Image (tube, rainbow, N blue to C red):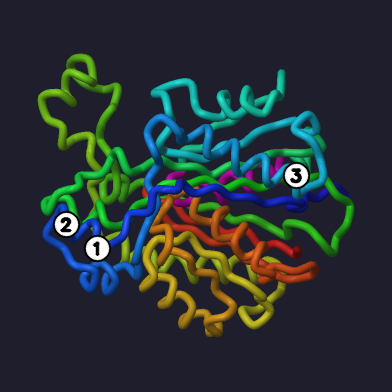
Amino acid sequence: MIYSKIIGVGHYVPDNIITNQYLESIMDTTDAWITERTGIKERRYFTYGKDTNASMATEAAQIAIERAGITPQDIDFIVYATITPDYYFPGPGFVLQRNLGIQNVGVLDIRDQCSGFVYAIATADQFIRSGMYKNILVIGAEVQSTFLNHSTEGRGVAVIFGDGAGAAVLQATTDKNHRILSTHLHADGNFAEDLYVKDPGSTREKRFFDDLIADKSTGEVIMNGNMVFKHAIVRFPEVIKEALTANQLTPQDIDLLVPHQANLRISEYVRQQMGLPEEKVMNNIQKYGNTTAASIPIALSEAWESGRVKDGNLICLAAFGSGFTWGSALIRW
C-alpha cells in the first residue's frame, strides 16, 4: 500500500513588520481593541519590488526541499494554494516552477481560501496514494495587504490580515507508522457572500476593471464577522473529531493541533472544546495575523523548527474559511 508523508517544511515572512501601534496612527483603532478581538499584535506586509507571492513561495519551498533532503528536480508535481496571485492568470505556481528550475512538471492552483493548504495537502496525498507522483511540493502563499482598506471604515478587516508563505514536501512511502492518516474536506456555498471579494469578477456588463474604477469598494474584502465566528467554532471541532473518529483516536491522542490562524479567540474556544492543554495547540497569529492559505504551513514550519513536532507525534491540521470551507488532515509524523 502506498501512502504519503511530509518530509520537509519551510516558511518565509516579509521583513516589513506592521504593529498595532502603526495601525493606530492611520486609522481609528487601538492596540487594546485589536488584541481583544483578534489576539494579533503585529503582522507582516510584503515589500514592493522585493517580495511577490511567487518569490515568497520560492523562499519557503527552497527551505522545505532542502530539509526534505531532495533537490528541486526530484519534485514531480506542484499544488499551490492562494487567493492572491501575482497575476489574474496564470497562477504563481508557474513562476515558482520557473524560479526553482523545474521543467515539465504539472502545476495545480487551489482556491479554497483559508482552507487552501488543507485542500492542497489532501489533493497531493491522493495523487501520491494513486501512484501517479512520488514527490509533491505543496504551497500556501498570500499577499493580502494590497487588498485591505487601511482606513477607519475598513479597520474591521484591515487589522486582521498579513502576508507570507509556507511549504511542505510530500513523498510516497510504504511506512504505515509515519504518514498522512486521513484528510477530510467540506464546503457550504450558502455562505459564499459572508466572506468574499467581489472583483475582479468576470460576470459584469462591461470589463471588470471599468467597474473597479467606478466603485473601488467592490475590490475590498467583505466579511460578516459574526457569521464567520459562529460557523468557525462549530466546524473546527467537528472536522477535528471527524478525523480522530476515522482513525479510532481521541483528542487526548493529539500531540499538536495546528489550526488555521484566523482569530486567537476561535483557536482558544476550539482548544477548550477539544479538552487540549495550551501546549498542544500551535498559535502564532500574534506575530503574523491571518495569512489565509499560508497560515497553517507557516505555523507547522515554526512548530517543527522549535521542536514541537517530533517523529511519532500525532499532528492535526484544521482549517475554516471563506466559501464556507473547512477541513482537516491527521498526520503521524
| Residue plotted at (85% across, 49% down) | 173
Going from the N terminus, do you reach mark 1 or mark 3 first?
Answer: 1
Q: Kindly check if marks 1 and 3 are in contact, taking CB atoms under 8 A apart as contact.
A: no
In depth, the one of 26 and 135 nearer the eye is: 26
Residue labelled with disc 3: 66
Which residue type carries mark 1? Answer: Gln
Instruction: Find residue 227 and report its image quarter.
Output: bottom left
Rendered location of residue 219, percent (x, y): 23, 35
Name the front one of labels 1 and 3. 1
Residue 119 is left or right of residue 136, and the answer is left
Q: Quadrant of the C terminus?
A: bottom right
| Residue plotted at (79% across, 35% down) | 71
Disc marking residue 25 = 2
Task: Answer few, some or many: residues within 10 Å of disc 3's Cα (few below 14, many 20 plus, some between 14 and 19).
Answer: some
Identify the magenta region.
112-127
- Can residue 172 be found in the magenta stretch? no
